[in-house]
Image: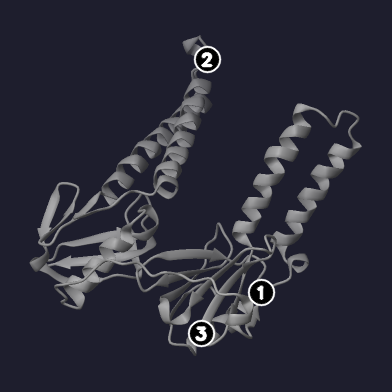
Amino acid sequence: MIRTKKHPVKYYAFLAFMAGFWTLLGLLLVFVAFGEPTPNDFGVADLIICLFGVCLLALAFVMVRSYARNVPVITLSEQRICFDDQCYDLADIHRVSLTGKVPFKFVINTQKEGGQISFKGGNKRYIYDDFYFNLWQVKLFLKKKIIEQEHDFALSDIEVDQPADGVIGQLEKFKGHVWASYRGILFFVVVVLMIGTLLDSKDVISWFGFFVLLVFLPLWFLLNTWLMHYFALNGKYLVIRNQLAFWRREVFEVSNIEEVVFESSSEAPNSMRVITKDFKHVKYFGATLSTKTWEKLVKRLSKTSIRVRNEADF
């Protein structure tokens, strides 16, 4: 039996942070609106502030409820699949789509990477990659059992080797310039300003100094390394490296990649999602890559055996 686990960061931590933020902000606005003890002082502006606070509280409640409904615990056996307490027979599955964007119902409906299971009678259930820790097991089971009609199989994940550079061979790089990108310039400007402020201060050894050196700058570095990847490719390997953490390297064999998805977002840089044949996935942001470099990477990957899905704004 397979039972999904919700992701500790992408589901629980994210939901707790966002719902907590809207709740605290909503309560703050309500307290501000009723801050004056005299009822006659409660005017139109206070009413608007109060209503806005109530809306934020409602948003927090709707968010928790929507995520709980959209991301149920999935239990899968040889004969049935259950989404929390709602169960279906595997024999009633009409169609399975294991990759692609699927609708996510919230205040404003959005699209998220996941899969779709259609049942006889018209019922549909959506599953979302980012919110589960082990959804790949469900997808691999459905692929073997439903799509390929296999009856004797094992859910084994792909062992990823990290060969040396000499084994990988010559690579074509798709890389941006840190000093020529907005994100790279912003990173170094903030670092220089913070260190310059500390050096200019007479009291370097202080709580502020410790906070900057031990908390802010390390977190700032981690955030920007998360956003600054670049890519290299040949006929056998796809290599992901990092502009700031230059020692980091991840290698995928082209033959083990199911699909590559290029994505754009208004809140983050362009990114590339790598989905392996066991349906594990990793998303890499490339904040320093220009539009032309992204376009070249799409064209180059399209010439390999990898299925390419370009959903980005380039």
Based on the displayed image, in which of its 4 quarters is residue 120 positioned? bottom left
Judged by depth in the image, the label closer to the viewer, 2 or 3, is: 3
Q: Residues within 10 Å of mark 2 (few under 14, many from 20)?
A: few
- Residue kind at label 1, given as amino acid type: Ser
Residue at x 31%, y 67% (from the top left corner): 156
- The residues bearing labels 1 and 3 have C-alpha atoms spaced at a distance of 25 Å
Residue at x 67%, y 60% (from the top left corner): 245
Q: Which residue carries the number 1 mark?
A: 290
Q: Which residue carries the number 2 mark?
A: 41
Q: Which residue carries the number 3 mark?
A: 236
Residue farthest along the top direction in this orientation: 38
53 vs 100, left or right, is right
- The residues bearing labels 2 and 3 have C-alpha atoms spaced at a distance of 73 Å
List x then y, in percent, for residue 306.
43, 83
Image quarter (top left, top right, bottom left or bottom right) of the N terminus: bottom left
Image quarter (top left, top right, bottom left or bottom right) of the C terminus: bottom right
List x then y, in percent, for residue 132.
35, 53
